Amino acid sequence: MENERSALEGRLRKSFSNEKPQFRRAIDLEVQGALGQPLTVIARDEMGHVVQVRSAMPLDRAEAQPITTERLREQLGRLGELPSPSVN
């Protein structure tokens, strides 16, 4: 089990050592959040892979710049050289 984990970790590290992505895939992003709850982002690709992440801190009321769909698209579109994500 430890050898498998070590081999997987080695492959992962190698995949991130290049500056350019080895492949690109369109993703759909679902963003969920509510005051006092963590922000949740769910990413799905056309092959059926799904990844879900949650923020460590709960969301607080915006004082200056409330989030909008356009702002989310702009900010999430800055993730490396990813194609423009579809934000739902």
Image: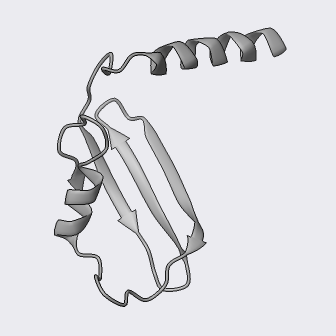
Residue 84: give x, y in percent of width and height.
17, 45
Q: Quadrant of the N terminus?
A: top right
Q: Position of residue 8 (x, y in %)?
A: 64, 15
Of 26 and 83, the residue lying toward us: 83
The residue depicted at 43 percent of the width and 89 percent of the height is 61
Q: Which of 64 and 30 is in front in this view?
A: 64
Q: Measuring 43% from the left and 57% from the top, which residue is drawn there?
A: 41
Q: Is 10 placed left or right of 20 in the picture? A: right
Q: Can residue 19 be seen at all in this image of the molecule?
A: yes
Asked where in the image residue 80 lies, by quadrant, the reply is: top left
Q: How far from the left and from the top, in percent, is residue 45?
A: 32, 37
Above or below, comparing residue 20 to residue 66 in the picture: above
- In the image, is 58 to the left or to the right of 50? right
Q: Where is residue 7 in the image (x, y as percent from the top left)?
A: 68, 9
Labels in figure, total: 0
Compared with 15, 47 (above or below) is below
Q: In which quarter of the image is residue 87?
A: bottom left
Residue 1 appears anywhere in the view: no
